[in-house]
Amino acid sequence: MIRFNPAANAVDTRTPEWPTELARLAERSSQPGLQAYYRAGCPAGDTPLEEVQLAALDIETTGLDARRDAIVSIGLMPFNLQRIRCREAFYEVVKPDIPLSEESITYHRITHSDIHQASDPASTLNRLLEAMAGRIMVVHYRALERAFLDRAARQYLGEPLFFPVIDTMQLEARMHRGSAQPGWLARLFGREIESIRLADSRQRYGLPHYHAHHALTDALATAELLQAQVLTHYRPDTPLRELWY
């Protein structure tokens, strides 16, 4: 039923009924961490958003292609519409299976020394799954997180990983690009194309600027962005299925 293609970094917009899908995946999984995650399930699609336990998720990688690049850090920030739970945050550096480049070190500030001290990827993924259990993930550009985490799960846990998400980038696209002209036509008529990158999206809601490219900081930034989006454009009782993928 899942129609996500990690190799193409693409997501079919048809969304499964996630509680049913996670229960099916739990029956098929034999890896303990994945099985426990799937068995924890998730809220039904008609659950009001204000009642949903969320967690903003961000990964930093050596590049943008999940077929060739690797995860170097993972950040997760639990929250709901009223509160961000910083004390429950999850952050770990991950040992990539490819060498760090100088560009990557400059970009993420994760060094060879950091990588050397990191725990093995399988242990990191199992701890991440425990932090994800029962929560809806919130990301900014779902294709990236889904592709890299699926690849890592296949490589280190021996099975794929599927999970429901709310994509704050997609929510911005709905509001600022849904009825917009194609990019080239808009530029022809002198129309500015709204940026839906994380920092630019936050700026529209008056949220503070954070230094980017740290997984936990970006997770916090994503959590704050969703809170602002819901406050501005939605109602707290909006059904979960209107936002998830």
Image (cartoon, rainbow, N blue to C red):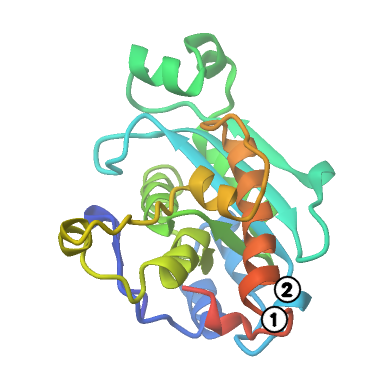
Q: Is residue 4 left or right of residue 121?
A: left
Residue at 69%, 62% in the rendered image: 227
Residue at 16%, 64% in the rendered image: 185
User: Earlier along the polypeptide chain: callout 1 or callout 2?
Assistant: 2
Residue at 76%, 76% in the rendered image: 50
Residue at 75%, 58% in the rendered image: 79
Q: Is residue 45 left or right of residue 12?
A: right
Farthest bottom residue? 46
In-front residue for pair 190/231: 190
Q: Percent position (x, y) of residue 46?
A: 64, 90
In-front residue for pair 184/11: 184
Q: How far separated are the C-alphas under marks 1 and 2?
A: 13 Å
| Element on which disc 1 rests | loop
For disc 2, the neighbor class at 10 Å (few under 14, some 14 to 19, many from 20) is: some
Determine whether 7 is above or below 152 in the image.
Answer: below
Farthest front residue? 190
Mark linked to residue 235: 1
Determine whether 49 is above or below 144 in the image.
Answer: below
Determine whether 120 is above or below 147 in the image.
Answer: above
Q: Quadrant of the rendered structure where residue 35 is? A: bottom right
Q: Which quarter of the figure is the N terminus placed in? A: bottom left
Q: Nearer the viewer, mark 1 or mark 2?
A: 1
Mark linked to residue 52: 2
